[in-house]
Each structure stands twice: as structure tokens, then as C-alpha cells.
Image: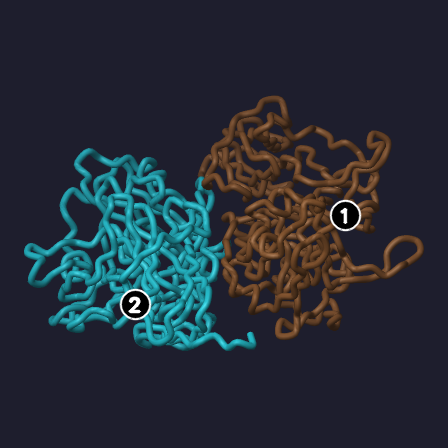
Chain colours: A brown, B cyan
Amino acid sequence: MGSSVAVGRKQWWDPRLVVVTTDPLNAETRLDLHDGIVTPNRLFFMRNRFRIPEVDSDTWRLTLSGEVAKEMSLSYLDLMAMPSTSLLVTTECAGNGRKAMQPAPEGEPWQYGAVSTAEWTGVPLHALLDKAGVRPSASEVVFEGRDRGPVGEAGEEVPFARSLPIDKAMHRDTLLAYRMNGEPLPVAHGFPVRLVVPDWYGMASVKWLSEIRVAAESFRGFFQVERYVMIGDSFDPPVQLTDAAVRSVIVSPGRHQRLQTGSHVIRGFAWSGNGLLQVEVSADGGDTWRQAEWTSPRQAHAWRSWQCTWELRACGSTELQSRATDTQGTVQPRESTWNQLGYACNAIQTVPVIVDEASTTS
Amino acid sequence: MGSSVAVGRKQWWDPRLVVVTTDPLNAETRLDLHDGIVTPNRLFFMRNRFRIPEVDSDTWRLTLSGEVAKEMSLSYLDLMAMPSTSLLVTTECAGNGRKAMQPAPEGEPWQYGAVSTAEWTGVPLHALLDKAGVRPSASEVVFEGRDRGPVGEAGEEVPFARSLPIDKAMHRDTLLAYRMNGEPLPVAHGFPVRLVVPDWYGMASVKWLSEIRVAAESFRGFFQVERYVMIGDSFDPPVQLTDAAVRSVIVSPGRHQRLQTGSHVIRGFAWSGNGLLQVEVSADGGDTWRQAEWTSPRQAHAWRSWQCTWELRACGSTELQSRATDTQGTVQPRESTWNQLGYACNAIQTVPVIVDEASTTS
């Protein structure tokens, strides 16, 4: 199974990451540290259910079994020898923004920093599945990581495992990734190989991948049906999370920043599992909205940066807000739909700032 | 002027970079270290004409003068407060591949590693020029860096300085960059601010930027008219370098690698200052060519990865080759046009490999 990395033993990551829990390690990226589409590896947010396992790439094997014509067992080098693809992908934790939800749901109190973007390089999963020959009986593909621990009230020990419907597993951009921003995966991000599922919330992108099973039935594992489901009043039956909901964040100005009257650039990022249409900005607490302009090119699966120049005239407190709209016309809501586990909290973020009279000597 | 960084004093870069000269520091990126579009900062090739200057961003100013309505002097924070853009850009030294040219021209003997790709973030230059109000008399914009030293036979001390025609300077993607792959520019890459000129050879992207002068006349500086010009038999008058010529490289298999008969994936990158049409691959020394497939998305200014699966049947020595074609139909030549300073050496690269009979027990 490989040994576990004790938290804090290998602090290769940036000390400016905001640690949310230490065991298991969960840490988010301060919004003001994002500048540019790609998040450097040591600033990329970390989300772990269990202790980080250490895997030896020399002895690591990936097994592929179940509803396939030919079961397979691949080494790290076997995988490296296969055709590969590189893609920019934004990954967001399903609980990102949970701290803003009222009343407070269960789960890690993430602010807005459980989202980052990297260039992932690896083998398209469909190439491996094609090689193995998926049977017509296949309906899902189950992915199991090396990380494991007790879950639920019974405290049963399970690995982190999740499934994808066969169509999503066969999507050309679903990757078995072994590189991150041009470097081998850091241990905390799934070394030697992880799944990368573009457009879906991050829980789907299983790290430290060890087993792939093609299944005829629906997977009922803990992290498939007990977690990463929308439950609570308005969700009966529970709804499994898939695509990331449309969202934008402001990265500058920062919260409670003092600004002088006059012209200011408001900047941020926007992303969505369903493509982006536009971002609008308000600098008067939501009374008026103005369309922002994109400052990075469109990418299939990555966030885009935007900016909007706003003339601040009135002194005093005000609120900066941004709202993104996806290609289906869905706009970020003023309030997220409350759910017990606090997922998909994509409500409009509010950034309070204070505006002072510009000094006449400037 | 700021002090100079002695070579080797701050080796934050990766020791696997291949040092070509130590003073000034020039180092290239081993081709096999490229995997994914983005080159990590510490693996990005380094090209310096002089010692690397150290600049204090607190006291640094960027002056903008000449044919403008309003001369300006900006601080680092002034620049950071302006609207910014993020772009993936491939930068290639004009002398990349020079070592393959026969007879050997002057200049650093680069192999194929003087090319890398980063995401640059910064202020579009046109925004600054618009603010200053460019006069109709403007024909060029001259950029001066903090790096300086003696040049030519007289050994006169000059700064590294280059000009752009006004249209290229006003291009929306020409940037004053202050971030590289989401991090502040490393000192060796131009901290605090450098020019990034997409599609042109790297000499245009002046580092450690200190002055911008809008000029009515053609700039005649050393690095404009004595270097970065195609001179020699077939070039009379000399031709100044601009767009990077179409080129591809093979990153895997490596030179002299032993392969077994059977199926192999050949991988590489291709780029061009004029857009890419296709890449073809030959595994029989150029007798037959087959179209490769792209394995990364199209980007306005960055290289693309490609691959091609080839069945190697014959044992013995053979040569792998790739040739890219740009959108104007220009194909990489078998031989580059010789020129005295060895620029634009975009001839097809040849990677010799040895094919052995596959062992029957594999």
C-alpha cells in the first residue's frame, strides 16, 4: 500500500497556502496569489480525504479489470510510452466557498481558494480503455486511489474511490495524468499518476491511482453516494455532483482594501463546467452591473481572467461583486441553494472595500 | 544601474539545464525535459548578452519618452495597477539549432534547446502607448534593458537595446510582462519587467526593461543592425530578423536510443511565427512521411505538441525526422540557408536511432 507522508514533513509547498486542516492536509490558495492562468505547483490548493500516501513509481502498477476483453496491468514506464496529451484544466473542490453558506454546513470551511489551474500531461483514458476493449455491458468506470482510511459511523477502512459514467470516462480529454505544469506530479497531487476529469468538480479526479474497474452496475462507494451528493430539504432524492457550477471570483482589490476615489481596475477569474458566456461586475453592491472584458484566451477547460475598470465616485463603504454566466444562460445566484454537506456554493462573492477622498496632491 | 549577478551565485535554476557559456550565462533546455506545453521557470532556457543585472523593484522606474504627447515615468506598482493580460508564448533564440549549421557560424553553439514556453502576464504595451499618446511621426519604439557591456571591435559599452516597428509595438499581444508562469519574473528572465514579443525571435523580448523611446527614425543600435541580421553570400543587403521560422523538434525517442522492432510513439513540438499547418514524421531517414496528430490545443503564440505512432520493422540504424509546415505553406527545409551569424537554422532535425530485433519473450 505504500507508507503515508506525515503532514508537515515535506513542506515543498508555498508557506502562503492557507492551511484549513493539517491531518489530513487541506490547504487553499490565497486569491491574491493568482495572477496568470496557471497556478504554480507549490501554490496549487491541496485537498485530501486521508493522509497522503507515498508511492514508488518503480513498483507501482495500474490494473484495469472488469467489463473488458483483456485485463491489463501497466507500469509507470508502460504508461509513459503511450501517446499523451497536454491540457490546461481548472480544478475546483466541490466544497469551495462553503464558508459563505449559512447556516454552516458540515465539511471543511473553505473560503474561495479551493480552486487552481494546471497544465496536465498524460494518457487519454479512452486510449487505455480502447486497448483493453470495453464490453457493451459497461456502464461505469470505477477509479481507486492509494489513499485510504476509516469512514462513516462504523469507521470502516476504505480507499478513496469514485466512478465515472462510461461516456465521461471515454471523453477524449479525460486523462491519466503523470505531469503537472511540465513536472512530474508532486506527491501531494497524486504521484505517480492521477485521474484528471475536466469540467467536473475535483472529487472526480482521483489521485494516486491504483485500480480501474469497468463495471456493469452503479458504484455505491462511500465517496460516491454518501459524500459529494447534494442532500437536504430541496434534494430528495440526493443528487450526485458532476459539472462545476458557473462561478467567478475577484482577486483584486482585496477584502477591506482602502481605495481612493477615481478609476480602479477590478480583476478576477471565472470558470464553469459548461463553458463561459460573460462576467459582469458591480462596484455599488449590486445596484448596477457592467460587462467585464476577458484578459486571457478561451480554453476548453480552464478559467479565464477578466477585468473591468470602474470609476469610484462615492466615498465610504461599498461592495465589489462579480457574476459569471455560463453558455446555458445560468447566472451565478445571489444565494446558493443550501445543502447539508455544503457543495456547489457558487453564490456571488462580495468584497467589501472602503473608498476615501483622493488626496489632491497625488 | 544596479549590481550584476555573478554567474553561479544564485543557482535557482535546474542543474539539468545545459550550460553553453558561463559568462555571460547561456543555458539551454534538454529536449527530453519538455513534456507539456509550459516550461517550468527553472527549466526555461537562458540567453544573456551580458551579466545579469539585479534590479530593485522598489526603486525601478520605466520611462516612456520621444514621439509622445505625454512623457511618463512608471513605478513597478504603477504598472501592476494597470489592466493586464495573460498569454502562453513560445520564445526561441534566433541562434537555436546553430550547432547543426555547416560550416560553423559565429555565436553560441546552441543545439535545439534554446526554446521554451511560458505563460506571461503583464500590461499590453499598447495600453501604455495609448496613455502617452503616440504622435503620427512615430515609426519605431526602442526598448532598452538594464544589461550592458562592451560590444564590437571598439569595445564601446552599450545597453542591450532593440526596436519594434510601431505596428508590432501596438499589437494587442505585445506585453510588458511582470509574471512568468504565475510567479514574479525570475532575475535571469528580466525581473522586474521585460518585453514579450510573441511570434518574433527572442532577441526582441528585451529583459530588465528600463526605457521605452518612441522614435521617428530607424534605430541603428548594435543589436539592431550588427547582430540579429542575416548576412553572408545570399543576404545583401542584410535582413533583420523578425518572425520565428517554422520549426519542429523530436523530444522522444532520444538520439542514439535503442528501440525494438514494433510500434513506437514519436513525440515532439512544433512552432512558427506564422501559425502552424501540420507536422509530418519520417522514421526511415526521409524516404516516407506521415502526418502527425496534435496532442495539445491550438494557441495563438505557443508551440503545440504532436505525436505519431510508427511501426519499426527493419533492424539497424535509421533516422527519425519531423518537418512542420506553417500557414503560408512554408515547410522546414532539409538545409537552412547559411548565414554568417548562424540565425534561423530551422533545418529538419535528424535523430539517429538503432532498431534491434524485438526479443520474443517480451
Camera-nearest residue between B92 and B155: B92
Q: Chain of mark 1?
A: A
The residue shown at (28%, 53%) is B246
- For the point 55% across and 61% down, the residue is A179
Q: Is A214 positioned to the left or the right of B43 in the image?
A: right
For this orientation, the residue located farthest to the front is: B360
Quarter of the image for the C terminus of chain A: give it. top left
Provide the residue designation for mark 1. A109
> Does B320 appear above or below A94?
below
In this rendering, is residue A4 above or below A202? below
**Can I make out residue B59 in this image?**
no
Is residue A322 visible in the rendered image? The answer is yes
Q: Secondary structure at mark 2?
A: strand
Report how many numbered discs are placed on residues in the image: 2
Quarter of the image where one finds residue A192: bottom right
Q: In the depicted view, which residue is nearer to us: B37 or A211?
A: A211
Front-most of residues B57 and B269: B269
Name the disc covering residue B350, or none: 2
Q: Position of residue B85 (x, y in %)?
A: 44, 43
Where A339 sits versus B295, above or below? Answer: above
Q: In the picture provided, is B190 more to the left or to the right than A236?
A: left
- B310 in relation to B352, above or below: above
Chain under numbered label 2: B
Q: Quadrant of residue B105?
A: bottom left
Spatial CA span between label 1 and label 2: 55 Å
Q: Residues within 10 Å of mark 1 (few under 14, many from 20)?
A: some
At label 2, the amino acid type is Thr
Which x, y percent locates residue A104? 82, 41
Contact between labelled residues 2 and 1, with CB atoms less than 8 Å apart: no
Q: Position of residue A175 (x, y in %)?
A: 58, 53
Q: Kindly identify the amino acid type of the residue bearing the numbered disc 1.
A: Pro
